[in-house]
Image (cartoon, rainbow, N blue to C red):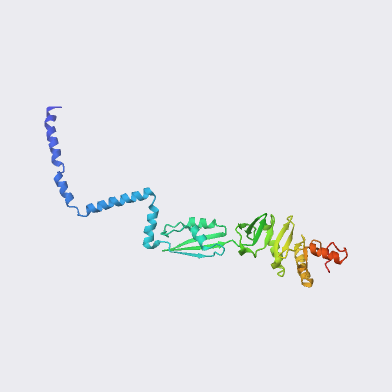
Amino acid sequence: MTPLEAELAPRGRGVARLHRQPVWRSAGRLAELPRWTGSAAALGFLTLTIGYGIVIGGHGRMVSEALLSAAGFGVEAVKLSGQREINEFQILEALEIHEGSSLALFDAAAARERLSRMAWVKNASVMKLYPSTLQINIEERVPYALWQRGDLVSIVNEAGDVITDEVDGRYANLLLVVNHGAQRRAGEINTALDKVPELRPRVRAAFLISDRRWDLQLENGISIRLPQENMDAALADIVSMDKENGLLSRDIVAIDMRLPDRVSVRLSDEAAEQRKIMTGGRGGTGKKERDT
């Protein structure tokens, strides 16, 4: 260091000290702040700490739900329309609404997806009606027939699609169709039976045979074998014969309508034995022509 630099160095440090803020003056300015500043700072720090803990602990949504609900945006009413087969409890369970749920944070799209996965639901809509109401509209699938294959019975719609396997007495009025493929052709036999309202209530089940024709099982146990062609005419003949001579009230087990020019009737074992005795062993075939 040169003599000149050595001489100026202390002076430079002295100038720097002259421009430095005195400690007593800084403390005086802090004293000029409002008295509540410290409390506000402490409160802010506490709020941030609590908020951080809530977020880290995964309770942010719960707190937000509670605050919004307290502000008047809680879910207080659920309006339902369109449901017949589904009970209200099942719908509310699918909505997943709990105490303190807020309408603002309710996920309508997710709720609609859950409703759409229910067996009876064809379409569903979920609307928020502020401040505190949910409007739920349900379009259900329409039960058309019961379909049995083996021991399993299902409710199907008109197209033959399975709605549910949960069947109870409420669906006893639906026609039971039996065997594979019968569910897709249920409309065929239902339409034919609708043309003979005198016979329809007496039909217990319809069996699809070899995917070609139908056998009917009546409530009294009589089986009616229908032809592949001209099924409507065969059903009309059955009704006509029943009106004329009470055919369906006789002691018989089967009526065969498959041949176009005759009706074959099979008697029960008891009736066949009695007929055999009365005819001296003749007429045991149990067959009758149409005009009898």
- Residue 262 lies, in percent from the top left, at 83, 64
Look at the picture and state if 43 lies above or below 89. above
Quarter of the image with the N terminus is top left
- Residue 23 lies, in percent from the top left, at 15, 44
- Residue 24 lies, in percent from the top left, at 14, 45
Identify the residue at image location x=50%, y=62%.
Answer: 136
Quarter of the image with the C terminus is bottom right
Q: Quadrant of residue 208?
A: bottom right
- Nearest the viewer among 212 and 285 is 285
Is residue 263 shown to the viewer in this render?
Answer: no
Identify the residue at image location x=31%, y=49%.
Answer: 49
Which residue occupies the extreme bottom position in the image?
A: 244
What is the total number of numbered labels drawn onto the structure image?
Answer: 0
- Residue 94 lies, in percent from the top left, at 50, 57
- Nearest the viewer among 160 and 262 is 262
Q: Quadrant of residue 72?
A: bottom left
Is residue 111 shown to the viewer in this render?
Answer: yes
Identify the residue at image location x=17%, y=49%.
Answer: 29
Image-based side of 33 in relation to 269, left or right:
left
Look at the picture and state if 238 lies above or below 110. below
Identify the residue at image location x=62%, y=63%.
Answer: 171
Image-based side of 202 in relation to 8, left or right:
right
